[in-house]
Amino acid sequence: METIVWFVHILASLAVVGLVLLQHGKGADMGAAFGSGASGSLFGVSGSANLLSRATSIAVTVFFITSMSLAYLASHGGKGASVVKAQHQQASEQVPAAGDKAASPEPVDPSKAKDVPQ
């Protein structure tokens, strides 16, 4: 489920970037009036603005919904425990029992210690 949401999220983000780059800025009509380029396109002057604006708003809405869905899935995922709780649980599992002789260290003879001055 999460993989599908990630896939749709990435497609929506690429669509938003592409659609924003395709749109004309507000100053594009003024530049076209002085002969620097053609203001019309395949859809006409106002047709492309309406189509691209609608497509951009749909892509942004899908991006927002998938962002919220991924945030929800991350907070309510299968792991459920925080990192601190997981480390505390691992540390408590590694502590040896009180009567366990195999886990308790042997006492060190001070005369055999190398770093202790005699």
Image (cartoon, grey):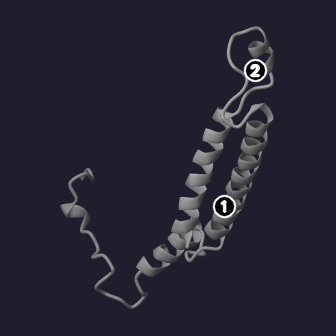
Identify the residue shown where x is 26% and y is 50%: 117
Instruction: Find numbered disc 2 in the image and state the secondary structure of the residue it sits on.
Output: helix
Identify the residue shown where x is 49% and y is 78%: 92
Q: How packed is label 2: few (under 14 Cα within 10 Å), some, or many (20 or more)?
A: some
Horizontal relation, residue 64 to residue 113: left or right? right
Q: Earlier in the sequence, mark 2 or mark 1?
A: 2
Where residue 29 appears, x then y in whole percent?
Answer: 79, 20
* In-front residue for pair 85/65: 65
Quick check: 69 above or below 96?
above
Identify the residue shown where x is 73% and y is 53%: 58
Instruction: Find numbered disc 1 in the image and state the secondary structure of the residue it sits on.
Output: helix
Horizontal relation, residue 92 to residue 71: left or right? left
Residue on which disc 1 sits? 66
The quarter in which the N terminus is drawn is bottom right
Residue on which disc 2 sits? 28
* In-front residue for pair 83/45: 45
The label shown at residue 57 is none
Q: How packed is label 1: few (under 14 Cα within 10 Å), some, or many (20 or more)?
A: many
Quick check: 23 above or below 15?
above
Closest to the camera, between mark 2 and mark 1, is 2
Give the image quarter of residue 111: bottom left
The disc labelled 1 sits on which kind of residue? Answer: Thr
Where residue 113 appears, x then y in whole percent?
Answer: 22, 59
> Whole-Å distance between the Cαs marked 2 and 1?
33 Å
Where residue 4 appears, x then y in whole percent?
Answer: 54, 67
Where residue 94 appears, x then y in whole percent?
Answer: 41, 77
The disc labelled 2 sits on which kind of residue? Answer: Ala
Horizontal relation, residue 34 to residue 79: left or right? right
Quick check: 88 above or below 27?
below
